[in-house]
Amino acid sequence: MLSKRLGQVKGLACVQNLSVLRLAGYSTDKQPVAEEAATADAKTAAQSPEIEQLKQELATAKEQNSELLDKYKRSLADSENLRTRLNKQISDAKIFGIQSFCKDLLEVADTLGHATQAVPKDKLNANADLKNLYEGLSMTRASLLQVFKRHGLEPLDPINQKFDPNQHEALFQKEDKTVEPNTVVEVTKLGYKLHERCIRPALVGVSKC
């Protein structure tokens, strides 16, 4: 009876000891939990330098990518600006490529104009040959002006217009009370513009201020 009682007491003591060990964080069949946590911390500490290196490499790669992207965008903008300038130059070359040729033909138009103005109008009816010559010169000049217009070349006759230094060249000043100051009162030579670009200014006389 006494031995049976001692066995029960020993069994209770073992159970209590196991409970205390579990509460203290120990495992009865594996390593203690504290040792497992220490091992995990050691592994994390060993991996920290590698993680920091990877972070630095990632930051460097992002910075390089940003620089390359900025250079790429700048290159695209430069290429677009260059393309725009080249297109404009090509367009201007097509439009104004005949500018020198037109300037030479202007002298021909001026000569025809002077010739028609030199013909005495009062003798045209009395002289058939003179009349035919005058009409021929007038038709030739009119035809030449039509060709000019077809290619964008138009005369500038600024009579009674405000003086514009971009399109007119003042040769002299003249008193004229009937117009405002700086008004073109006389045109000695017509100017010409090619597609809105003045290629020869009109030679004019301007009213005094």
Image (cartoon, rainbow, N blue to C red):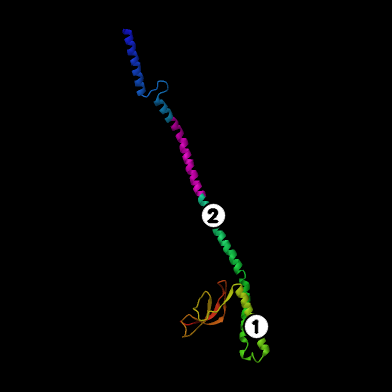
Q: Position of residue 86 (x, y in %)?
A: 58, 61
Q: Position of residue 39 (x, y in %)?
A: 43, 28
Judged from this view, the residue extending furthest toward the front is 1
1 or 2: mark nearer the eye: 1
Q: What element does badge 1 sit on?
A: helix
Q: Quadrant of residue 37?
A: top left
Query: Is residue 43 found inside the magenta-colored segment of the image?
Result: yes
Judged from this view, the residue extending furthest toward the bottom is 126
Give, as a single range, the part of the protein colored magenta.
Answer: 42-68
Q: Please state if 197 lies on the left or on the right of 15 as rendered.
A: right
Q: Which mark is residue 202?
A: none
Q: Quadrant of residue 101?
A: bottom right
Q: What element does badge 2 sit on?
A: helix
The main secondary structure of the magenta stretch is helix
Q: Residues within 10 Å of mark 2 (few under 14, many from 20)?
A: few
Q: Which residue is mark 1?
A: 137
Disc 1 to disc 2, C-alpha distance: 58 Å
Residue at screen point 46% across, 38% down:
52
Q: Which mark is residue 76?
A: 2
Count the marks: 2
